[in-house]
Each structure stands twice: as C-alpha cells, then as structure tokens.
Image (cartoon, grey):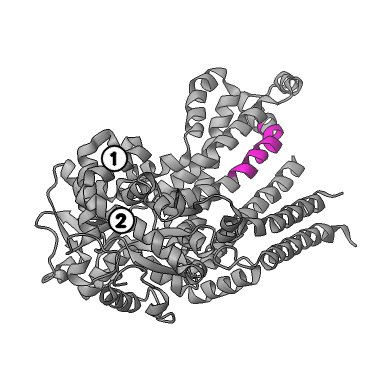
Amino acid sequence: MPGRWRRPLASLASLAAFLVAWKVVTVLTGTPDYILPAPEVVVDRGVRAISSGILWPHLTATLAEVVLGFGAGALAAVAVGLALGKSVVVERALSPYIVAAQAIPILALAPLLDIWFGGGLAARVLVCALIVFFPIAIATMVGIRSTDPQLTELLRSLGATRGDLISRLEIPSALPVIFGGLRVGVTLAVVGAVVAEWAGASTGLGVLINIANQGLFDTPLMFVALVWLAAIGLVFHGLVVAAERRLVADR
Amino acid sequence: MTAPRRVSILVLTGLLLAACAAPSATVHPSASATASAAPLRAVRLLLGFQPDVQFSPFYLAQQAGYYADAGFKVTIEYKSDADVVRLVADGQAEFGVADATDVMISRTSGIPIKYVSTLYDLFPVALIGPKGDVPGPTNLASLAGKRIGTPGTYGSSWHALLAILDAAGLKETDVKIREYPTFNQVDGLLNGDVDLITGFRNNEPLQLAAHGMAVDMLTVEDVAPLPGPGMIVGDQLLAAEPGSVAAFAAATLRAQTAITANPQIGLDAAIAVEPTIGADRATALAVLRATIDLWRGSGSAPTGAIDQGVWEKGYATMRRLGLIDGSVPLAEMIRGVLTGG
C-alpha cells in the first residue's frame, strides 16, 4: 500500500470501528433512541436537519465565533507570550492575572461577559478568545525561552538587532511549541463558542443542543449538533496541523 | 503498533465495556426492589435543578413519613427537566415532576411517559412587567413591538409566551425577544433592556418587588389555558403497578394538603433539606404562599386531579403553535391516578 494512503485509511478504519462499536452498544443494551440513538438514526436526523434548513443558521453562527475568537485570542496570546518570554518583569506583572483568569471557570464568567458586552457576537467572541488565550500564551513564552543561547550569541556577534533575533531566531525556534499551544487552543475555541452560546445567544450549535435537548426532547438532533461540533474541532485542528507541517518544515 | 490503531482499540474497548455494564444500570427498579428484603420499596424521585421551597411537599412527605406509610423509601435527586423526563421514561427513576407542555412534546417525540397527577392547578409562568405596562386580555394586540425577555426558545416560559402571542394574533417576529439563558431576565427588566419578561408567578414578582418595582402580570389562563406541572411516571411502571403510582401520588397530595393548611411546616421541611432557604424566612414563606395559590387554583386545596378540559385546550394550543403535531392523542399523555383524574 502506498505510504500516502496509510494515514487516511487508518483514520477511516478507526471511524468505521467506532461506528460499529456504537451500533453494537445500542443493539446489545436495547437502549432507546431518546437515551442513546443508533448511528443511523443520527445520520437520518442529520440529513433531515440539513434539508429542512434548521442546521445552517446555528452552524454558521458557531463557525463565526470559533474563527473570530480563535483568531483574536491566538494573536493576543502570541503577542503576550512573546512579551512574557522576553521579560521577567512583564511575566511577574502579568502572570498572576493570566493564571487567575484561567482559574476562573469560563462557565461562570460567560454570563457576566454577555451582560457587560451587550449580549452580541462580540461577547461570544471574547469568551472564545479568553479560553484559547492561556495555552497559546504559555506555549509561546516557553518556546521563546527555549531558544538556544549559543545561537543568540552567535547572531549577536554577527550584528543582529533585537528585531532580527526575534523574527529570525526566537520565533522560528519556538514555532513547534507555539503550534502545540495552537492545537490545544483551536479545540478549546469550539468549547468556548458553546459556553458563550449557553450564556446568551439565539443561534449557534450550543443553542441547538439546548433546543433539541430541553425544547424538542429530540436526542438524535442533539447528537447531530455534537457531531458537527466535533467535525469543526477536527477540521480546524487539521488546518493548524497542516500549517505546522508547512511552517515548521520550512523553518 | 501505530498510534491510530492503539486509539481505535482503546475506543472499542471502552465502548464494549460500556456495553457490558449498561444492562446492569438499566435493570428495572421493581426487580431490584423485589429482591430486596427491606420492608420499604426504594424509589427515586427526580425534581428540577436544585432544592427549593416549592418542592416542600416532597420534603414533608419524606420527613413526616407519608411516603413510608405508603410503602416507599424515597431518594430525591435534582436533574434538568429534560433528564427528568428521559430517566423516568427509561425506568432509571420511578417518579418525576415535569411541565405538562414538556410532557406533550416529549410524548409526541416517542418518549413513553405519562402525566398522572396535577401538582399545579394553574400554569405558573406569566408575562410580567412594570405596573400599567402589561396588556390585559382585552388589549393583547398592544404587545406588538414590545421587547420581551425570556430564558430561551424552549420550556414552559417559551410555551407560555407563544400561547399569549398566539392569543393576541401575533407571531414571535412581531415582538423583540431577548434571551436570558441563565434566567436573569429580572435584571434585564430592572435595567430597562426589555419591557416585559416571562417569569414564574410565585418568584419573579417577589424579586422585582424587593427591588421596589410594582408589577402587573398577564397569566396564561387569562387568555390561553395550559395545564400546569405534575407528576410523571414511565409507561412500564404505570402499566405494571398502577396501585403503587396512585399510592405515591396520594402521599404527595397528603403533604401538599398539609402545607396548604399550614405553610410553616412546608417551609421548615424545605429548610431541613436546604438550610440556606431559611436565610430569609419571610421571602421563602412568601414564595411558598404564592406557590400554594398555584397548587390549589380556584379551589380551597389541591386535589391532584387532572382537568381534562384544560388539557384539551392546552393540547389544541400546542398543536396550533406547531409544538406538537397531533400524532399522539391526548389520551396517551395523561392517566389520572387520583380522584377525578
């Protein structure tokens, strides 16, 4: 088998095995659909949700929150992580706030942010950005500090400026660690979007989960929303991995 | 072994272990009770969200021995409304409390539960606003354009709002709806973010009064009657043990009747379960008195009976609103086990 087919085939085999196991569980236990729907029931419900058009507004709302929240959070986190990595004073000054913000459950903070920021998209993007910020900022700081000091001295001796050191040495050498933070952050962005929607929104996959669960008692539809959330996480994680392969390989 | 293979095997193993474990978790409670030597039958009662003075009949029935007299050892647990319905239907819990409108929707979705006794004679949700700003039954059309705060587009608050708008000849797009998923619509009304809110008649008006706001209410029964919350059981349990279900409902009604006559004993029972309820006894007692008014409706005491007429009107309203499709007849949703039901 050609090497390039191995990975996708392994993924497909894994997915097939998961679906078979899921089906086996529902058959063996006789669990009703309102507790654990079988995979084909979820697929059927998903097709009907797409064809009826009820899925799209929720899907696009969540996608917008994830993209904007991850983008804003990642940019801010890399900038702050860089400052933290370069300056012990900045780290001492900011770290307590960053750690405290991370320690506060976002579930408790989201309703307040919803009130403070007018209950619109901005509030939900901010929740997403906050949840992705910490792992990326810390990864960036750690990555910057792991730069080989001998290489730093070498470049300095060749006349490199402070900007040269950052752009040509420290950031490139920190990239693998930063991408580790981005991988974690992009999946957290999906979680953040759902939490933000639960705190205050009229559309989004998190809202659809609530409507399906508590309004329609439609467990298969709830699973459809969960599957889409998982798919969004997988796709964005894949994009980050692809960017990592390209940028880290080119380094 | 490659990483994907390891992951697959872990997933499969986990799911297969779950498959082996699941049947023991779904054993019908009556089977385990039969096997038990204990004189009282252990049952689970599921209530919504968290301890509350409104649940005082269940606390009193447990503490005063009414449930024991009826042959039950009751464990009270708190779940989301949706989980109450599912777990009772699946036989993982014997009894639960649910909104009648949720019973109609869940039953239509194929969830095998039945509403067996009425706990609230009146639908507890109303449209609430500053005094003079709430339309009455004769000028409902003035609701058009109002900003209305509600927890979300599901549940009893949403059903009440839709029913009122329907009675006014309006659609949800004729008003501006703002959602408060964390149930803080009172803040929205106090801040002036919305003109009106949906809220529980035995709760939100008292909260607003505490902030100095005098309020008016438009109740559901004024314009579009809907049945109130009640006790639910799974079809399987009701078919197998109708006598047990009736005995449990009667024990709960016994406590409701005692509290109606003397609300203080209900408050004390609630405080025994959740001491923080006693932090402001006056407010808690006011909530309980307002709740008692909802239990008994126009009568002098709650009866637990199911009002067929209100259910028929509510069923028709829910169909008109598109919340149920009529595929499941009303007779499959209710089965009264107390006098007059």
- Dot 2: within a 10 Å radius of its alpha carbon, few (fewer than 14), some, or many (20 or more) residues? many
Residue type highlighted by circle 2 = Arg
A25 or B194, nearer to the observer:
A25
- Is residue B86 in the magenta section? no
Image coordinates for residue B269, horizontal then vertical, percent: 32, 42
- Front tag of 2 and 1: 2
Quadrant assignment, res B142: bottom left
Instruction: Classify the position of the C terminus of chain A by image quarter.
Output: top right
Which is more N-terminal, label 1 or label 2?
2
Both on one chain, marks 2 and 1? yes
The residue under label 1 is which amino acid type? Asp
Q: Foreground: B311 or A227?
A: B311
Q: Few, some or many C-alpha atoms within 10 Å of disc 1 (few <14, some 14-19, many ≥20)?
A: many
Q: Nearer the viewer, residue A21 or B95?
A: B95
Seen at 60% across and 63% down, the residue is A36
Q: Position of residue A16 (x, y in %)?
A: 75, 64
Say which of B69 and B325 sits in front: B69
> Residue B16's image quarter?
bottom right
Q: Main secondary structure of the magenta part?
A: helix
Q: Quadrant of the N terminus of chain A?
A: bottom right
The residue segment tinted magenta is A171-185
Q: Are marks 2 and 1 in contact (CB under 8 Å)?
A: no
Is A42 positioned to the left or the right of B20 in the image? left
Q: Which mark is residue B254?
A: 2
Residue occupied by mark 1: B268
Q: Residue at x 59, y 37 (%)?
A: A136
Q: What chain does mark 2 sit on? A: B
Cα–Cα gap, marks 2 and 1: 16 Å
Residue appearing at x 51%, y 33% in the figure: A102
Decide: is A190 above or below A153.
below
**Disc 1: host chain:** B
Query: Extreme right residue here?
Result: A1
